[in-house]
């Protein structure tokens, strides 16, 4: 299209119909975005020069920029720069594209299911779904979303929508108690019991269970079912900071996860061994508070290690670079897998985490079909609203189905006072959708998945 008749100052106009019938030649221009964007925080966005500046768009910009043909529209003009009458501009290929692309591990059906559920159920947070047996990420959702075609709007709104919460670090809370459960078995302290009176004192400092609940005498299974802070404070004192830290490191805490070249998650924060010589700091660490922070990706990998039989699998987002026939030409290598605990320990811990859902405080996570296991978590953030109420992080991380896990799922709702839908219930909605997807080959709609949870 030309701004003025008989001039060579072209400008672009997006049209929704074929204009050739009206004598107006049109030319298709390849775009790097889907009409309905998906996984926007992971994929990233382009700047005004069509260069990738965030996410996978930035990591693979050199490959993606050369994928399509470089085309030019040329036309014949007079010496004065006017179009010659009767001449039609022609489309020419200046340089051929490579046809290469980047193949992700995401499943589009599962991704859209989770995006829909997140949109219905949370205002700020994230969802991750991992293939239990491979460590491949099948869905990665962060809320609020943004429009990669209008990033300026999100910047002006200052609504934190550009943050990829799946890769960012947050206060972990009680979901971290799974680390102590692994350490207890590895150190032969799985026998430990504690008579919970609702509070416990360590060197003059009192630590309480949520809402001051009194759990009575509990073993490790009962402490996980009821998320008994007092039990884990005492267990932490027995284990010691060095043992807990070693187990946490084996499970991937304290280290970033590589997503793609130049793109990695936050490392989170593990307290130093020296700081845990302070019994108060050790007490807080033992139920996921204090200086500890972790990414939802780390929590997912931790839970997955229990679900798959005791092996830590580095999360994987990208298979590699593919040619125009979808054949891999360059594979992305992940870190080596590592044994965290023996298979018998993992099996017992899976049973305990299943009890959290069936007998304990994680009942909202129970799916409509089959069973699930997992752990709740509520973490203090140190942030407060205008009324002085503290904003909290609400976690649920678990696996589905419990008997032979195929999916490891983590849900985080970030910095809210009390969510309308619990993170455990969101987990159940995802599990319901996955069950239907496996049966029909297509993911359930978010609305139906939520109704059947």
Image: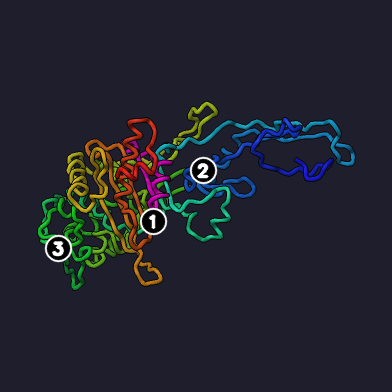
User: Residue 80: x, y in percent?
Assistant: 89, 41
Which comes before the other along the chain, label 1 or label 3?
1
Q: Position of residue 401 (x, y in %)?
A: 26, 38
Classed neighbour count for the residue bearing mark 1: other residues with Cα under 10 Å, few (<14), some (14–19), many (≥20): some
User: In whole angstroms, how far apart are the C-alphas of marks 2 and 3?
Assistant: 49 Å
Provide the residue span drawn in magenta. Answer: 112-137
Q: How is the image coloured?
A: rainbow
- Mark 1 and mark 3 residues within 8 Å of each other at the beta carbon: no
Q: Is residue 128 magenta?
A: yes
The furthest residue to the bottom: 204
Classify the position of the C terminus by image quarter. Answer: top left
The residue singled out by tag 2 in the image is 37
Earlier sequence position, callout 2 versus callout 3: 2
Say above or below: 148 vs 86.
below
Nearer the observer, disc 1 or disc 2?
2
Reading the image, the residue beneath label 1 is 169
In magenta segment, residue 190: no
Whether residue 138 is visible, yes or no, is: no
Q: CA distance from mark 1 to mark 2?
A: 25 Å
Q: Quadrant of residue 238?
A: bottom left
Q: Nearer the viewer, residue 138 or 449?
A: 449
Q: Say which element carries label 2.
A: loop
Percent position of residue 395, x then y: 31, 54
Kindly identify the residue that appears in the image at 40 percent across and 41 percent down. Answer: 113
- Name the disc covering residue 214, or none: 3
């Amino acid at each position: 299209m030309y701004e003025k008749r008989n001039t060579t100052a072209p400008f672009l106009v997006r049209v929704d119909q074929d204009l050739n019938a009206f004598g107006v030649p049109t030319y298709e221009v390849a775009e790097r975005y889907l009409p309905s964007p998906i996984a926007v925080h992971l994929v990233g966005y382009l700047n005004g020069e069509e260069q990738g500046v965030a996410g996978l768009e930035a990591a693979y910009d050199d490959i993606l920029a050369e994928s399509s043909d470089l085309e030019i529209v040329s036309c014949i003009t007079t010496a004065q720069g006017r179009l010659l009458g009767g001449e039609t501009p022609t489309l020419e290929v200046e340089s051929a594209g490579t046809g290469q692309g980047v193949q992700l591990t995401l499943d589009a059906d599962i991704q859209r299911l989770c995006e829909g559920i997140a949109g219905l159920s949370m205002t700020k947070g994230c969802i991750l779904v991992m293939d239990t047996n491979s460590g491949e990420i099948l869905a990665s959702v962060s809320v609020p979303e943004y429009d990669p075609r209008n990033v300026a709007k999100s910047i002006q709104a200052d609504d934190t929508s550009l943050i990829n919460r799946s890769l960012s670090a947050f206060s972990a809370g009680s979901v971290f108690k799974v680390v102590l459960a692994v350490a207890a078995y590895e150190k032969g302290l799985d026998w430990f019991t504690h008579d919970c009176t609702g509070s416990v004192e360590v060197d003059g400092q009192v630590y309480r269970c949520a809402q001051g609940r009194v759990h009575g005498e509990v073993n490790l299974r009962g402490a996980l079912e009821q998320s008994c802070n007092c039990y884990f404070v005492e267990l932490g004192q027995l284990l010691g900071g060095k043992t807990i830290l070693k187990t946490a490191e084996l499970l991937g805490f304290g280290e970033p996860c590589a997503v793609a070249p130049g793109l990695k998650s936050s490392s989170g924060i593990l307290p130093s061994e020296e700081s845990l010589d302070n019994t108060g700091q050790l007490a807080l660490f033992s139920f996921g508070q204090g200086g500890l922070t972790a990414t939802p990706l780390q929590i997912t990998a931790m839970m997955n290690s229990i679900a798959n039989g005791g092996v830590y699998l580095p999360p994987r987002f990208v298979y590699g670079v593919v040619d125009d026939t979808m054949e891999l030409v360059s594979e992305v290598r992940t870190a080596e897998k590592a044994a965290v605990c023996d298979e018998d320990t993992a099996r017992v811990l899976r049973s305990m985490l299943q009890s959290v859902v069936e007998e304990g405080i994680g009942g909202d996570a129970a799916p409509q079909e089959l069973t699930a296991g997992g752990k709740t978590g509520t973490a203090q953030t140190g942030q407060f609203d205008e009324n002085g109420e503290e904003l909290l992080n609400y976690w649920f991380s678990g696996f589905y189905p419990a008997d032979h896990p195929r999916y490891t799922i983590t849900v985080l709702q970030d910095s809210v006072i009390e969510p309308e839908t619990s993170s455990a219930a969101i987990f159940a909605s995802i599990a319901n959708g996955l069950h239907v997807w496996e049966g029909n080959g297509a993911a359930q709609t978010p609305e139906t998945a939520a109704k059947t949870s």
